[in-house]
Image (cartoon, helix red, strand yellow):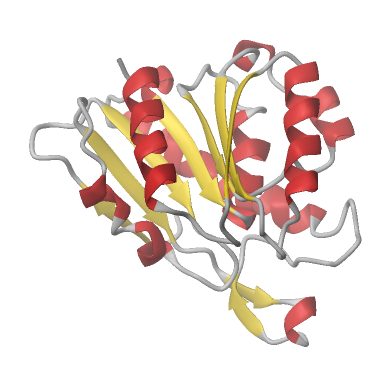
């Protein structure tokens, strides 16, 4: 299992959020949002650290990443994405072993981490609570159609994106949104006048989303 950070609620957890960071960051990146969320449910937060791998757009130098990002490639990083998805599933399965039911587990991710959250959640063989996809996109919609799990049809998916995002243009996220809606998922979309980042209003919306899916 990957190295990770866990933050426990003040009372025993009845739900879990597994949140995957973006390229070059680590699990500490989203640790501060836990204090900013005032949730009605006692939620365990798990922040895995991606392994280090050589990154093409970084001149082959190693950094923490869920997959090698290859510009203008629809299928680049396929093997890495599959491996990272299996690593995410390990965390889900461990939560099941700890007594948290699948429908009380939410997968979340920012940028690359969001790609893995979507890839994993749509294929998982038990119904999960939902997916939180921040500043990200759906990788290879054709394979999603072929491999997705029927048990997770229509799960709630919150997508949020910055209108000034130069790293992942908002149109790529909007196309992903339309594909998810076409495939029957319950997508809630939010955009903000920011770059490749999150903002306070977005965190507040995330809190409302988590309260809804864990109610």
Q: Look at the image and tell me whether residue 96 can be seen.
A: no
Tell me if residue 76 comes above or below residue 142 in the rendering: below
Tell me if residue 159 comes above or below residue 185 in the rendering: below
On the picture, is 64 further left or further right than 214? right
Q: Quadrant of residue 64?
A: bottom right
Picture residue at 53% right of the left edge, 47% below the top: 109
Q: Quadrant of the N terminus?
A: bottom left
Residue 168 % position (x, y): 72, 57
Tell me if residue 112 comes above or below residue 184 in the rendering: below
Q: Is residue 176 or residue 195 the one in the foreground?
A: 195
Picture residue at 59% right of the left edge, 61% below the top: 196
Q: Quadrant of residue 153?
A: top right
Picture residue at 79% right of the left edge, 46% below the top: 172
Q: Look at the image and tell me whether residue 36 can be seen.
A: yes
Residue 17 % position (x, y): 37, 38
On the picture, is 69 further left or further right than 83? right
Tell me if residue 207 comes above or below residue 3 in the rendering: above
On the picture, is 193 further left or further right than 202? right
Number of numbered labels in the structure image? 0
Q: Is residue 37 or residue 87 the one in the foreground?
A: 37
Residue 177 % position (x, y): 72, 31
Q: Quadrant of residue 67?
A: bottom right
């Amino acid at each position: 299992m990957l190295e990770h950070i866990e933050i426990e609620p003040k009372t025993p957890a009845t739900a879990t959020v597994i949140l995957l960071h973006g390229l070059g960051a680590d699990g500490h990146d989203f640790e501060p949002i836990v204090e900013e969320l005032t949730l009605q449910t006692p939620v365990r937060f798990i922040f895995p650290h991606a392994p280090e791998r050589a990154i093409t757009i970084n001149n082959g130098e190693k950094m923490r990443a869920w997959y090698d990002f290859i510009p203008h490639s629809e299928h680049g990083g396929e093997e890495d994405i599959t491996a990272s998805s299996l690593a995410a599933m390990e965390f889900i399965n461990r939560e099941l072993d700890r007594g948290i039911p699948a429908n009380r587990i939410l997968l979340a991710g920012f940028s690359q981490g969001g790609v893995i959250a979507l890839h994993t959640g749509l294929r998982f063989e038990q119904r999960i609570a939902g997916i939180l996809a921040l500043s990200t996109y759906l990788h290879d919609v054709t394979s999603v159609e072929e491999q997705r799990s029927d048990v997770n049809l229509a799960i709630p998916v919150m997508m949020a994106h910055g209108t000034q995002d130069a790293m992942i243009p908002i149109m790529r996220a909007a196309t992903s949104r339309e594909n998810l809606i076409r495939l029957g998922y319950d997508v809630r979309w939010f955009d903000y006048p920011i770059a490749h980042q999150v903002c306070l209003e977005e965190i507040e919306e995330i809190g409302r989303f988590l309260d809804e899916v864990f109610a």
